[in-house]
Image (cartoon, coloured by chain):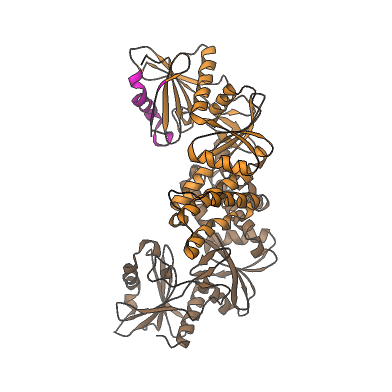
Chain colours: A brown, B orange
Amino acid sequence: MPRPDWIAADWGTSRLRVWAMAPDGTPLAGARSDDGMARLAPEAFEPALLGLVSPWLAGPATIPVVISGMAGARQGWREAPYRPVPCTPLGPEMLTFDGIDPRLAVAIVPGLSQARPADVMRGEETQIAGLLAAAPGFDGIACLPGTHTKWAQISADEVVGFQTCMTGELFALLSGQSVLRHSVGATGWNAAGFAEAVDDAIGSPQKIAARLFGLRAEALLSGLAPDVARARLSGLLIGLDLAASRPYWLGQEIVLIGEGRLAGHYAEALAAQGAAVREADATEITLAGLRAARALLARKGWP
Amino acid sequence: MPRPDWIAADWGTSRLRVWAMAPDGTPLAGARSDDGMARLAPEAFEPALLGLVSPWLAGPATIPVVISGMAGARQGWREAPYRPVPCTPLGPEMLTFDGIDPRLAVAIVPGLSQARPADVMRGEETQIAGLLAAAPGFDGIACLPGTHTKWAQISADEVVGFQTCMTGELFALLSGQSVLRHSVGATGWNAAGFAEAVDDAIGSPQKIAARLFGLRAEALLSGLAPDVARARLSGLLIGLDLAASRPYWLGQEIVLIGEGRLAGHYAEALAAQGAAVREADATEITLAGLRAARALLARKGWP
């Protein structure tokens, strides 16, 4: 493998992903670890990064590393203050600094903030930039399912507003740590149970507090199967998310940026509500966004 | 202290409480431990009970022990099958057996079940019997706040229907283990923040999924104080409970059976909605219910 031109990194709360990038923006190689922001003290970020990328650092030359995500959080490597919406997903306010290792020139992409209702994102702004790079002039909604699902309204190349629902985190807590863990399977699925639960939560969100314990009661009284309980819990929580996010998807063009099963479940739930959904690959969109950040930095003459 | 006539016990998921009872139903002494159902295998229940009550067992005579709560669960001491509503809170179907220690004659009060919507209770039926003993002919709603808050409609001495909301458990998970733990204080309170959040959740339950992360975002962006965040999280979840339980409290006479701060928060929230709430002491009501169970067993000639 030739020496990469630069390194792209997506630093999440629970994992770190890096790519060695060719001058034309093609990824030459990739690596990942569980060194997410949550387990690292500020001084541990550079060693965690070097642990993955040092095989790519032949010779003494400096290499640019462009990072999106939680490295810029207050508890991250260095804080990159939020940029307030409405604004373009990427702006000139990149946080740049040199590594202790002289071969590293680091740039961290700042997240976005919204004053009212209060909300924040870190990482998704880079994916939105990637979406705009792949679909110039896109006007509509980006839905980014995850631990904290983000809904962003995009118009005239700007993020106009956004909203976060703790859908993935609620599912993990309720299925893994609440009394529902006795009734909700760790795997398995039931499409009909999921669809009914989504409908139920969207149609009657005020009943959600009672519906949750109902899963436990049905398991005790009539042997509700663990895979059905799992699909119904997911349906109730995604339905509750959709109830809160209705202004973001009703009558809108939606691009779903996600991976794996969770994105598939959101796509099903939105399609059942009659919403027009297009799915985009999250890794490709992330790389497109990091390439856009790299290009913006290069125009500023960095590094 | 004279040798008690019988022993009353309330066996919860996380704690065990026992009382030595005089023939006239007065508690002579009480004791408690953390030997809740959740940490005990079936064979560990009798030793856990003896650990608390053996000082009261002078001589070889048999003593009746009347137990409400989770001892009768499938994962408890011995399973006492649910009694389906509508029914009186206590019935003749008590589970009785002798201890391995010949001094113990054990009776477990069965819980109640509801087929549609599926729901179950264990322990609250005894408190409802205590409420009816203290207020014969009561016609209205019992609200029993807790890890799993129960709402029960009572009429003509029967439990007509009931509903469970996982309000206390959701608060514990979100405040202690989710991303909100960074923003929600372990103590502290703000009455105005609580009241506004209750109103918000009752009026717009469909927005709850977004409101939760808003607490984190406000803490990051504008320094939302941890005590205010704590009160607002509690208000959102109690408000969501009240939204689901509206048919149980709207225009109804409500007795709140609870202890400490949580019961106070429910009382405030219900009063703000214009509901007429009377508070009853949970321990006194529990003892009244266990006395009613003891009297019912005695009429059957047990032990």
Nearer-the-camera pick, B194 or B120: B194
Does residue A29 appear left or right of residue B147 in this picture? left
Nearer-the-camera pick, B112 or A42: A42
Q: Position of residue B34 (x, y in %)?
A: 38, 34
Query: On the rendered image, what quadrant is the N terminus of chain A found in?
Result: bottom left
Going 37% across and 11% down the picture, which residue do you hit?
Answer: B61
Going 34% across and 12% down the picture, which residue do you hit?
Answer: B60
Q: Position of residue A277 (x, y in %)?
A: 64, 66
Q: Position of residue B18 (x, y in %)?
A: 42, 25
Whether B42 is among the magenta residues is yes
Does residue A1 appear in this view?
Answer: no
Over which residues does the magenta segment extend? B28-56
Nearer-the-camera pick, A297 or A200: A297
Give the total number of marks visible in the rendering. 0
Would you identify the image quadrant in which residue B22 lies?
Answer: top left
Would you identify the image quadrant in which residue A59 lies?
Answer: bottom left
Whether B48 is among the magenta residues is yes
Query: On the rendered image, what quadrant is the C terminus of chain A found in?
Result: bottom left
Would you identify the image quadrant in which residue A33 lies?
Answer: bottom left
Q: Position of residue A124 (x, y in %)?
A: 52, 69
Query: In the figure, B152 relative to A44: above or below?
Result: above
